[in-house]
Amino acid sequence: MIENIKKIGVALKILTNKRATVEYPENKEILPDNYRGMLRLDIDTCISCGACARICPNSTITMVDRDTDRGIKKYPEVNLERCFFCGLCEEVCPPKCLVLTKSYTEVVSFDRREFIKEPEELN
């Protein structure tokens, strides 16, 4: 009996305490300067060199064909499910058109197919 009363007391104490977690999305966490989030691609400056796909340690990036006004060009397609967010693709990109942002909200999904981001979705 006394043990049950103690358990109820502990439960009431926990319920009345201030929450320990951040209330997302109303209050977003402050990210450090070196945080690596969602990838962004500037299609206009991409030279289709494929350096990002070759340097990726987890084969996250594949080059896919896209029709442009100058013919068919290859652009990076990213599978975020496999991405380590290591930043090697950003470092090796000659025109610096592929960069890691601080955005992390777009990385959440219940459908695995939504993790594959086509070049047009990386803008």
Image: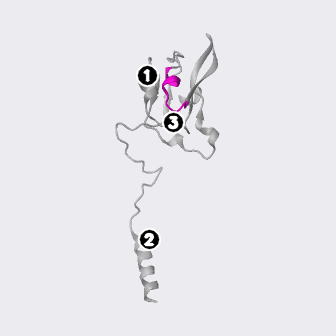
Judged from this view, the residue extending furthest toward the left is 33
Q: Residue at x 46, y 26 (%)?
A: 89
| Mark 3 to mark 1 CA distance (whole Å) | 16 Å
Amino acid bearing label 1: Val
Q: Is residue 55 positioned above or below 47 on the image? A: below
Question: Magenta segment, which residues?
Answer: 51-60
Q: Residue at x 41, y 25 (%)?
A: 91
Marks 2 and 3 in Cβ contact (< 8 Å): no
Residue under circle 2?
15
Left or right relative to 48: residue 94: left
Q: Is residue 53 positioned above or below 103 on the image? A: above
Residue under circle 1?
92
Q: Residue at x 46, y 89 (%)?
A: 1
Q: Is residue 44 positioned above or below 86 on the image? A: above
| Mark 2 to mark 3 CA distance (whole Å) | 38 Å
| Mark 1: secondary structure | helix
Give the foreground label among 2 and 3. 3
Marks 1 and 2 in Cβ contact (< 8 Å): no
Crowding at label 2, few (<14), some or many (≥20) Cα neighbours within 10 Å?
A: few
The percent position of residue 100, horizontal first and vertical second, equals: 44, 31
| Mark 3: secondary structure | loop
Q: Residue 83's mark?
A: 3
Residue 53 inside the magenta-drawn segment: yes
Judged from this view, the residue extending furthest toward the front is 57
Q: Earlier in the sequence, mark 3 or mark 1?
A: 3
The percent position of residue 23, horizontal first and vertical second, equals: 45, 55
In terms of image quadrants, where is residue 60?
A: top right
